[in-house]
Amino acid sequence: MTVIARDALRARFLRVRARTLALAAPLGADEQLAQAFPDASPTKWHLGHTSWFFDRFVLAPFEPGHEVDASLEYIFNSYYEAIGARQPRHQRALAVRPTLQDVHAYRARIDEAVDRFCGHASEVDFRRAAFALELGTHHEEQHQELLLTDIKPVLAGSRIPVTYPTQARSKDAALPLEWIEHEGGLHEIGARAEIAEKAGFAFDNETPRHRTFLEPYSLASRPVTSREYLAFIEDGGYRTSALWLSDGWQTIQQEHWTAPQYWEECEDGYVEHALGGRAPLDLEAPVGHVSFYEADAYARWAGARLPSEAEWEHASEGLPVEGNLLESRAFHPRAGSSTSSTSARGGQHFGDVWEWTASSYAPYPRYRPFAGALGEYNSKFMCSQMVLRGGSCFTPTEHVRASYRNFFPPAARWQMTGLRLARWSPT
């Protein structure tokens, strides 16, 4: 990986840090302290944890005399075993100290210290710290997305309506579904060295670029819509065991799932809970908040399948990263988001919803994790997870790319996750 220039990295750091505060600003103090369920985190914790990352991995190793506050380290360390003990994830809301005001003051101190370091560090010292600094900005972008997905159940669960400011919903119709043919054969996937150099960054799990063999396949030009998913429900999809993987069938029985998360059945159909409030179900938009199990069952019902991550990346490589991403401020999937350029080249592949693939999250051939404690960032999760691709309406545009690998357990659905269909091409 080639690190971007000092001035550009410094500007990126300040831009990303400011965006996090802007995303948290519409939330009151009470909302920022709440933790909806064990796998989610309070907004206050996201604000503190992302600051701790720069504190621990940039300032402590590279700024002479800098020390991390041990109490803050315990509270804001996420999962780094090499760093030491930490607040249990399901108890993050119990950390009433530092206060929200204290966390904002902590952020300001870290911002000032990192900005000062960028200004005075020698070229040698800056180059030594640049990798961790750049990784920290991409790490914070992941937490910007998590901040939104983690606050959504808090707002949706309030009896007294609480909404987050969003752009008006689209009234567009879904684009016609087309099947885009792709050639089989030996192809390469993974972050290209020249792309990493131009963009300045790729996560370790995107590397190394390697060859993989693909059978000829077809990929849908857009994700599955809520209207299409509703047809699956109405046809008894959640009651037909033959459509489901064994673990998926067991999960929907135990959890009593009958529809995607945030759908609520009413007398005249469904409504859904979005960040912008409770509203009639947008049937034309891509369906979101479905688990891998639900995505897989739908694909079987539709006479198709989920694509492999290699197929998804092969079909997406070279397409511009554009679509309904965080900067649109819709914070909800939208219908008809393809542009003329992407439609002509195989459909819209970025934004709206993360797309489940049929691939388990595993290391690429010759994979090497980041060195030291940062090696825990991705590699320790390469078990019992499934890969998602493409980004969502909560994902910053400059964060995602064709080679980006997201991953979640197959039963997870609080993230903005949907699906795109694939099928084998005729032989």
Image (spheres, rainbow, N blue to C red):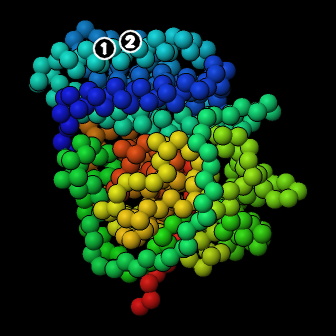
Which residue is located at x 29 percent, y 58 percent? Answer: 190
In contact (CB < 8 Å): disc 1 and disc 2: yes
> Is residue 337 toward the left or the right of residue 400 in the image?
right
The residue indicated by pointer 1 is 113
Closer-to-camera residue (84/224): 224
Question: Residue 328, how many percent across, how many down?
Answer: 49, 44
Q: Say whether residue 342 is visible.
A: yes
The residue indicated by pointer 2 is 109
Q: Say whether residue 305 is visible.
A: no
Q: Which mark, by number, is residue 88?
A: none
> Is residue 13 toward the left or the right of residue 156 in the image?
left
The answer to whether 88 is drawn above or below residue 40 in the figure is: above
Q: Which quarter of the figure is the N terminus placed in?
A: top left
Residue type for callout 1: Ala
Tell me how far mark 1 sits from mark 2, CA to CA.
6 Å
Residue type for callout 2: Arg
Disc 2 is placed on an element classified as: helix
The answer to whether 150 is drawn above or below residue 49 in the figure is: below
Disc 1 is placed on an element classified as: helix
Mark 1: few/some/many CA within 10 Å (<14, 14-19, 20+): some
Closer-to-camera residue (249/125): 125
> Is residue 163 toward the left or the right of residue 146 in the image?
right
The answer to which quarter of the image holds residue 117 is top left
Which residue is located at x 19 percent, y 29 percent? Answer: 6
